[in-house]
Amino acid sequence: MKKLLLIYFILLSGIIFGQVTDAEKLLRTQRNDTINNWKTGGVTALNFSQTSLTNWAAGGQSSLAGSTMINLFAYYNKGKSRWDNTLDFGYGLLKQADKKRAWKTDDKIELLLKYGQKAFDSWYYAVLLNFKTQMSPGYNYPNDSVKISSFFAPAYLIGAVGIDYKPNDNFNIFITPVTERFTFVYDQELANSGAFGVDPAVYDSTGKILKNGKNLRTEFGGYLRMLYKQNLMENISFQIKLDLFSNYLKNAQNVDVNWENLISLKVNKYVSATISTQMIYDDDIMIVDGKNADGTDKKGPRTQFKEVLGVGFSYNF
């Protein structure tokens, strides 16, 4: 999988660099509309789906689903200084007729702050802060009695100093060999189980906790973050975000991957459709995948994948 990702990244980079010149020409006209060197905007979307079945011979289940997405940005560009700020928020729920509790289908909060000082051409010396968490508890559905995540469990904070290549607002790569990553698990039950790579609790022979699990894990390593946006057609846009992290202190060869894609199709000013995918691989996150012969949970790192299709109301500003 790592070789495929590397090949994909090399090919994609070649395509992107070939399109940089045309994209930069377009963005020069957009920058004329900025105020006091700031360029701000965003998109918000609200999607719903509903199914109602009565005496339906083919079977099925009535359900109601809804999701919301908010993406905001504020870019500052003056002289040799650039300051990029983005906020991404997503949340979704699914309620089935025979379930008392709604199931969560999406939950995301991500804040990115990056400041750069021009080195030469489109290269900048830069510092970056990236924070991610979620809002509400998550469960391994259909089992909705055992919690596997919660607010600030996990939460990730990355602090990095490196170089940033940004020829325009549509494309940039941030690379650094000096990165500190913090994983917070402020749900003691999850921390005691060693969720998300923190040190688990220590128990005696009777199962009594002698020492609580840690709520914080610190890693030091190398980090790469890439962002690419492109209008494929007049009303169709495409966005890629890729994060790669290698922990020098433990299994540096096992690179953590967070790869997101978003396609937006604009029907008119207020109606749109979005297709988003996210792939995560982190060998410190243990996924329960069945049972062992002795009845214990079968756990191990797995490739995580999420796909969300939404059709509904949206507004760009």
Image: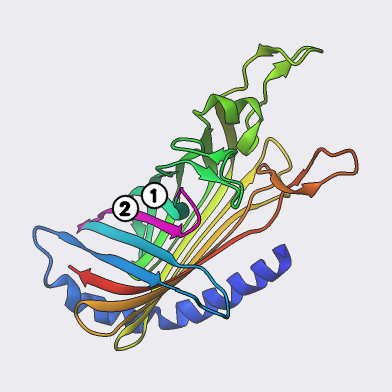
Q: Can residue 262 be seen in this view?
A: no
**Residue pointed to by mark 1:** 110
Q: Is mark 1 on a helix, strand or loop?
A: strand
Question: Mark 2 or mark 1, which has the lower sequence index?
Answer: 2
Whether residue 177 is visible here, answered yes or no, is yes
Give residue 147's quadrant in the image: top right
Highlighted range, magenta: 77-101
29 in magenta: no
Quickly name the residue at label 2. 87
Q: In which quarter of the image is the N terminus?
A: bottom right
| Rendered position, 181 above or below 302 | above
Left or right: 112 as drawn, with respect to 158: left
**Colouring scheme, one of rainbow, by chain, secondary structure, one colour:** rainbow
Question: Magenta: predominant secondary structure element?
Answer: strand
- Picture quarter with the C terminus: bottom left
297 or 55, nearer to the observer: 55
Give the residue at the far left of this rendering. 35
Q: Where is residue 153 in the image (x, y as percent from the top left)?
A: 50, 36
Q: Left of 234 or right of it: where is 249?
A: right
- Where is 40 relative to 296, above or below? below
Q: Are marks 2 and 1 in contact (CB under 8 Å)?
A: yes
Residue at x 29%, y 59% (from the top left corner)? 70
In the rendered structure, which amino acid carries the disc numbered 2?
Leu
Q: Which residue is drawn at 54% across and 27% down?
A: 216
Based on the picture, tell me whether residue 91 belongs to the magenta stretch: yes
Q: x and y percent of residue 20 in the render?
A: 39, 78
